[in-house]
Amino acid sequence: MSTTTSKKTNNIANISVLTFAVMNITTVLSTRGLAPEAEYGLTSIFYYLFAAVCFLVPVSLVAAELATGWPQKGGVFNWIGAAFGKRMGFVAIYLQWLATTICFPTMLIFIAVSIAFIDKNHAQAIAANKYYILSVVLGIYWFATYTTSKGIKSAAKISAAAGIIGTIIPLLILFISGLIYVFCRDSVDFPIAENQLVPDFHQFHNLVLASSVFLFYSGMEINAVHVQQMDNPSKNYPKAIAIASSLTVVFLVLGTLLISAIVPHNKINLVESLFITYDTVFNYFHMPWMSQVITAAIAIGVFGQITVIVAGPSTGLFQVGQEGYLPKALQKSNGNGVQMPILYVQGLIVTVLSFVLVVLPSVQSAFQILGQLASILYLIMYLMLFSGAIYLRYKSPEVDRPYKIPFGNVGIWFVGLLGLFSSFLALSLSFVPPSQINTGSASSYITMLIILTLVFLLIPLVIYHNRKNTWLPAK
């Protein structure tokens, strides 16, 4: 008996510190987030470091403790449900799914702009056309849904290959070519002397774009479920998180500062600046064709990411729904085991939100408001996560946690309150219109965010309240 158990343990504990660090880096790191923070120049370093220390690390540590104490399928549903009941657990898993769903249009806008920049002569005119953006967003999303319907394994393979082609390689090329460009130029457009490392906190509205950093770091809790597959998690997990957090911050800071240094501040755009950076660098080296290749690769990379994410977050909601929390119609899957009814609902939400593109003043404003809405919903879930972790230390102290935040209850209070404070701060900032972007009337912007937040929060509560015995699995 003991020999068998030992073999199982050896088979399970096979994720190294470096492997786990890479898993977390690839989950968080994306080229889409570089341009928005380039607005801040040197100040972006402060935002990246603040969000990493006060949010990224606390999320990682709290999620690891909860994942090892409550390892059942369902993730945040089980963790928050154990603390505050199944109703709140259902709200949490719903918010995690919905926040990711709302992010799809911003990811797809990024693809549409990258495709436009393949045609250098008309790139900016095409990228500013809302109807072009809308058609590409909807076309690519529903094609990705069709691809996903063929099976999760094939989508994962596409995503892995596309991630290397469209994220890792373009970032490395940006770092190398961008640094050479900055070194070769006698002067750059980045006014280092005029920038400050610490932001002016009196200019509250200037901090709004910075709150999006928290969304860049979201998703660390997804990989926490694998912490039990590490050897000596109490020692190796913090090492992996330290490596992942440090490298992620370095990559984001370097990429952001290069964009800020290369693109004049008055021309920085939330969607287009990354591609303008490649254009500027490769035109300087008389290789304009190279920026077209990189742009196409980035589009492929984001498409691959979307292909796997289309089904990924909805899987947890599907698993919870099969326990009787969703109508039978949403508990069904196709012959490949893919939860198509939920994906159709997800696609409907993406389609409706995408039409916001036609209503708002610009593509930039649509990009901003959808990103802020996703941040608000995700941050509400994180507030539940941090408070739940603290509460469970007192409610369920007897539950074995292979990984436990050190220093007893003092440790969980410190980490939990740090996460709660930073999440609440980012949540508050998310409702303030940014001064850098024309989002129309400030009152309309705030009203739209408040109404959408309340409506989306009400939906899971209504579903839970009206659940029926017929939704329960057959005995």
Image (cartoon, helix red, strand yellow):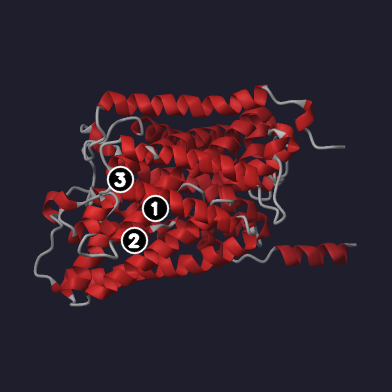
Q: Left or right: where does residue 75 sit relative to residue 299?
A: right
Q: Is residue 156 above or below residue 219?
A: below
Asked which secondary structure carries label 3, the reply is helix
Counting residues from the N terminus, which is met first, the one under dot 3 or under dot 2? Answer: 2
Tell me the residue at 44%/28% (across/down): 452
Question: What percent of the width, then of the height, locates residue 364?
Answer: 28, 44
Q: Left or right: where does residue 398 sit relative to residue 18?
A: right
Tell me the residue at 43%/57% (across/down): 29
Question: What percent of the width, then of the height, locates residue 417?
Answer: 48, 34
Residue 278, quarter of the rendered image = bottom left
| Labels 3 and 2 touching (C-beta < 8 A) | no
Tell me the residue at 35%/70% (across/down): 172
Between the residue at mark 2 and the residue at mark 1, the CA separation in whole angstroms equals 9 Å
Residue at which label 1 appears:
136
- Residue 115 is marked as 2
Closer to the camera in the image, 348 or 314: 348
Question: What percent of the width, then of the height, locates residue 133?
Answer: 34, 49
Closer to the camera in the image, 426 or 306: 306
Residue at which label 3 appears:
130
Asked which secondary structure carries label 1, the reply is helix
| Labels 2 and 1 touching (C-beta < 8 A) | yes
Counting residues from the N terminus, which is met first, the one under dot 1 or under dot 3? Answer: 3
Q: Is residue 413 above or below residue 241?
A: above
Residue 183, quarter of the rendered image = bottom left
